[in-house]
Image (cartoon, rainbow, N blue to C red):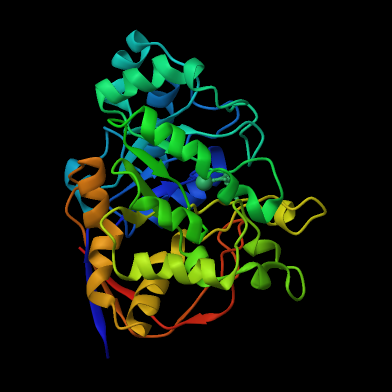
Amino acid sequence: MKECTLLMPLDMHLHLRDGVMLETVAPLTSYTFSGALVMPNLVPPLTCKEDVIAYKKRISTALGQVEEVDPELMMDDYFEPYMTLFYQNYDVKFLADVQDEITAIKLYPAGITTNSEGGVSSFDIEEMRPTLTAMSELGIPLCVHGESDGFVMDREADFMGVYELLASHFPDLKIIMEHITTKAAVDMLDKYKNLYATITLHHLLITLDDVAGGMMQPHLFCKPIAKRPEDREALLKVALDAHPKVMFGSDSAPHPQHKKEACGCAAGVFTAPIALQVLCELFDKHGKIDNLQAFISDNAQNIYGICPEFKEVGLVEDPFVVPEKYGEVVPMYAGETIGWSIESVI
Ligand code: NCD
Ligand code: ZN
């Protein structure tokens, strides 16, 4: 039976939500990941230090990592929520004050995806300059949901001009192109030294055909929408080669079943509980399992300069039947059998 050991897995783009949903989904990631970059698109979004601290505390409480808990118990399943702030134009004093509480700031174009209404409505470099200059000086990375409001299949490619503007005007700012889905974005990586990218599990596996080519598959509908076969091939190549500027970010985005299986389906694919198993299967299928450690952790550690707590996850090539639901949420591959399972977590 084939085996794979992964050290300190990191998910550098994760939606944990709040309330009951947070309690359902957070343990599914903390079980196997050492940490995750937690997205700030709550309602209302996270735009101040107090809200970030309070949300981090709610995450810790949902995971049983509260201070009163026996420290030895905490060590067993320690998980670091790397917090983010929702991009708005902030002044340098505000950023210097919040810096210790966050790992990055996430920029959403206004209205482009779930809970992004308070995002940026025009990419006017001069308006953004004070904030982005301060972020460059303080060393706070900028994570970007890179989509225009154009035709849905062209939204990411259309956004490349904005990435070029940002990367060239702010050469000392680390810019992460989030959940890239196109060859155009892959090609950008080597053009600017300060551009990086996250890639999801589902965009390595599916194209638009899987979403809407046959019967409509609401659980595969997400933003950015899955693209063409040649785009998936370009993503697969850089992921399987563990290109040093790409890292895993699941964009696991839970919505209750009634919001997905509905007229006006919410965007988001829920992959947190199957991500490591399916990545092992995929990298193994392509003979690249030795590169998975870099894609799942080492590259992110280098890019963000983070040192996660030790965690060792053992996986085996042994079938696993994906549950139909976790709480109210239907995962990708619900009810199907995948080839690899989690065997141990130390
Ligand atoms: C995300 C969500 O539901 O919060 N949805 C998605 O389709 N990916 C938001 C996002 O990352 O775009
Ligand atoms: Zn997301």
Q: Which residue is drawn at 52% across and 66% down?
A: 231
Q: Which residue is drawn at 34% across and 16% down?
A: 95
> On the rendered structure, is 7 left or right of 85?
left
Query: Looking at the image, is 110 positioned above or below residue 336?
Result: above
Which residue is the extreme one toward the bottom?
Answer: 1
Q: Residue at x 43, y 45 (%)?
A: 177
In the figure, residue 141 lies in which quadrant?
Answer: top left
Camera-side residue of 27 and 206:
206
Residue 125 position, x and y percent, is 49, 22
Residue 270 position, x and y percent, is 55, 58
Query: Looking at the image, is 60 positioned above or below residue 47?
Result: below
Please state, as top left, top right, bottom left or bottom right, where the C terminus lies in the image.
bottom left
Q: Which residue is drawn at 52% across and 74% down?
A: 322
Residue 13 position, x and y percent, is 42, 47
Query: Looking at the image, is 110 positioned above or below residue 74?
Result: above
Residue 345 visible in the snapshot: no
Camera-side residue of 28 and 68:
28
> On the rendered structure, is 125 left or right of 78?
right
Residue 177 visible in the snapshot: yes
Please state, as top left, top right, bottom left or bottom right, where the N terminus lies in the image.
bottom left
Residue 299 position, x and y percent, is 24, 54
